[in-house]
Image: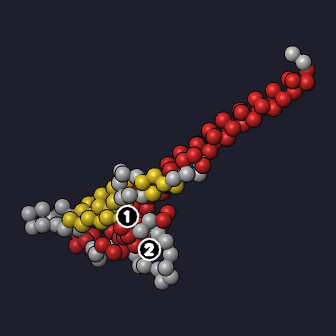
Amino acid sequence: MKRSSRKGQGLVEGALVFLIFAGLLIGAADCGQVVFAHQSLVERANQATRWATLHPWQGYQPVVNMVLYGQPEEPRETRPGFLGLSAENVVVRYQPATPERPDDETVSVSIINYESHFFSPWLARTLVSTRPVLVSAPMPRHTAMLR
């Protein structure tokens, strides 16, 4: 082979390797973003559940606000929720204590239908998670805490 025809071969091979490497790098960033978002949602649901267990039950809205905004009150200015969440994505279940089971008071916080957005151009779409983030905790008896 002539020397002049081999000069372009290294450039073409380098371009192909670069495309594969860039695709792997963007794919790793996409996976990392999804894992980070999921872990952030788990942590936010955990914080909201802990807040609900430490305060006397005041209804669902303060717990939803804890997930969306990180505070029990809704902010004065309108802003999107944490990672683009809305109130429809947060489900709070409260089970009050009964006379038969006075120690069975629990609260559960679920984050459902969270949308993940990807960086990669060939995956440039939205993935809706079908698995909810669910955190449950028993509520301490507040009368016992006051003693």
- At 48% from the left and 83% from the top, the residue drawn is 76
Q: Pointer 1: what residue?
A: 89
Q: In this view, does 62 lie to the left or right of 75?
A: left
Residue that lies at the very extreme toward the top in this rendered image: 1
Residue flagged by tag 1: what amino acid is it? Asn
Q: Is residue 26 left or right of residue 89?
A: right
Residue that lies at the very extreme toward the right in this rendered image: 3
Question: Can the viewer see residue 81?
Answer: yes
Quadrant position of the C terminus in the picture: bottom left
**Residue 15 appears at what percent x and percent y?**
75, 35
Q: In which quarter of the image is residue 137?
A: bottom left
> Measured along the vertical axis of the image, is residue 43 above or below residue 144?
above
Q: In which quarter of the image is residue 134?
A: bottom left
Question: Can the viewer see residue 54?
Answer: no
**Residue 88 appears at what percent x and percent y?**
36, 67
Quadrant position of the N terminus in the picture: top right
Residue that lies at the very extreme toward the left in this rendered image: 100
The span from disc 1 to disc 2 (Cα, nearest Å) is 17 Å
Residue flagged by tag 2: what amino acid is it? Gln
Q: Is residue 116 left or right of residue 95?
A: right
Q: Pointer 2: what residue?
A: 71
- At 37% from the left and 55% from the top, the residue drawn is 133
Around disc 2, counting alpha carbons within 10 Å, would you say few (fewer than 14), some (14 to 19), or many (20 or more)? some
